[in-house]
Image: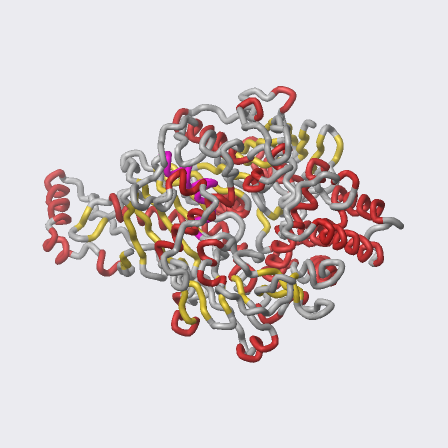
Amino acid sequence: MTSRKRVTPALQSGSPARAIATGVVAVIVLTACHSGDDDVKPPQANVLPSFIKSAVKTQSYDGNADDLLTAGLGKTGLASATAPAIANPAQPSAAELRRLAIWSNYRALVDMTANGGYGRFWGPNVDLNGNDTLGEGKIAGKEYLAFADDGSGKQNVSMLVQIPASFNADQPCIVTATSSGSRGVYGAISAAGEWGLKRGCAVAYTDKGGGNGAHELSTNRVTLIDGTLADAGAAGKASLFTANLGNVDLATFNSQFPNRYAFKHAHSQQNPEQDWGKNTLQAIQFAYWALNDSYGPLNGSAHTVRYASGSITTIAASVSNGGGASLAAAEQDTSGLITAVVVGEPQINLRLPASVSVTQGGAPVGAIGKPLADYTTLANTLQPCAALAPAATGAPYLSALPLATTNAIRAARCASLASAGIITGGDVATQATNALALLHQNGYQTDSDVLQAPMWDSQAVPAVAVTYANAYARSSVTDNLCNFSLGTTSSTGAAGVTPAVSPMLTVFGNGNGVPPTNGVNLVFNAGATGAADHRLATADASYAGAACLRTLWTNGTLTNSVEAVRVNANLHGKPAIIVQGRADALVPINHASRPYLGLNQLTEGGASKLSFYEVTNAQHFDAFLGVAGFDTRFVPLHYYDIQALNLMWSHLKSGTPLPPSQVIHTVPRGGTPGAAPPLTTANLPAIAATPAANAITIANGAVNVPN
């Protein structure tokens, strides 16, 4: 990978001396004089955006040994459950870490099973028409990688642009792929990057200031932009993330809390979410620079501007946090950088007036528009207990712990909730039913009842609750907020053990930025016998810590930071599509897409061009569809994300009207859990041009969703 230093405007200015030396501008001037046109100006220099503070690294891929989409693994290698090999496990190379990151991130967001649709409805081999024509699906092209920052070296937001060899310079397009969750810069490669690359578009990625920036406090090692490691002192401003330890003595902290880790999203003390929209817009600007660097006319040895800002068809696309970032970017975009928006299951925090309402089948839903800090800290306290409700019987199991251990934890959590007066009931079944009812009252759908258990058992909800509470509170790692920390644990759950192999070596490739991840676990420091895995630290799975996180929201500690991330749903008339599953139990649909639709209509009125497609039997994690019980009950949302992108492309290029907002009634695969029959189009009805009785209606901010 080559490094390119920033080119200053002075070196690119069209001075007379430089014009004579190159001959280029001189010819233009002579031509202008000959034609009598005194307004012709020298070509505009392609100036690197001022927010790019690092060297720009570039690398070309031949589409055989290595490529943009699969890192040389192809369709077959991505499908393999065996991670790509690392020649020297003690010192992975940047290329090996990139390959691992693409493999893990691709697999993390889609169902990789053949019966579930991989290789048939999506995958590197599937072309834009849905046909299996692309073989291994490797895509040749070029990457540009750099940091965006304010000069402090504390933000260091990763920016990556992929330009496929199939890019048509005369019909340019850009697709954004802002990372979902807190993933690294390749975090949306299967969710949006793949479609963009197949379309021949440049893809603008960013990790939006979360990413896999980890700091191993026991060794003082940090990750760099390419995933390789360095001492924090030596790395300086080149670090992806270095914890701000303030006046705390690192040696003292390590002795008290050995083998702990700081992660960027949780511990940067910057509330990075407030900049997710800006980061997405910056990724587009960086893509413009990269495209001009590749295709702009030469003025001597320097490229000039071929593509002026706003001149390229650009779709802001991603899912989950990346989807929320795309919507925020579109709201902030007043200069025409974004042409359209297509997002799935967006995590978005609304500034919601009382005039917005949501009904389903004519009946008001439990609650709408709550911010993540509210509903996640609530779910984190209630879900272990709600998992025992009769309505959740038969829920898919996603824990490595024995079921008997998990059930004991669940019952103990019910007892603690009852003792605290949060739920009522004299027996576990009644307490659990009460806990589930409380979730319903707070906007969770009955469609997601069987998902309350796996959302907590998989540690998705606890991880999000701890990470975001830290981020919103702007906590340092040394604060141990609510007695939680991030560290390695033993087979019995005890914290502080020295790992046989440091998780740092592959955290860039395997990590998701929100522990538990890659061997770094969620630790409760105030366990019954000392610090331990939060599920095992106390009989009720560290209820005191969960209750503390909840209090941070209810007592207003997190309010200011949450206000900073709220949006207004003003897309400025941009055509947009939102897709979300009705059964989403991580980002409940009543707090995200449904009220966003109402607020957008209230804000934009007749200028609104937003369509919302609500998919029944779809939830947040398509990667879980390969798990027994998920396969029989749920369909892939990713299928409809692809359809939405195709519909938007047809709308932009051919003027085809976007189908109106609607509910899509899918058909689960059924069969035996773990051996569901193959997914077919019979399970996946098309998005209807005329939805009739399935239409979602909106009037004066009131959204009515049919059953």
Q: Position of residue 353 (x, y in %)?
A: 67, 44
Residue sitting at x 58%, y 25%: 683
Observer-nearest of 294 and 264:
264
Viewer can see residue 417: yes
Q: Quadrant of the C terminus?
A: top right
Is residue 424 shown above or below 699?
A: below
From the viewer's perspective, tell me whether residue 430 is left or right of residue 687: right
Magenta stretch: includes residue 165: no
Magenta stretch: includes residue 187: yes
Residue sitting at x 77%, y 38%: 391
Q: Magenta stretch?
A: 185-199
From the viewer's perspective, tell me whether residue 5 is left or right of residue 433: left
Q: Position of residue 576 (x, y in %)?
A: 50, 35
Observer-nearest of 8 and 689:
689
Q: Quadrant of the N terminus?
A: bottom left
Predominant secondary structure in magenta? Answer: helix
Q: What sort of colour scheme is used for the picture?
A: secondary structure
Q: Position of residue 549 (x, y in %)?
A: 69, 60
Q: Quadrant of residue 614?
A: top right
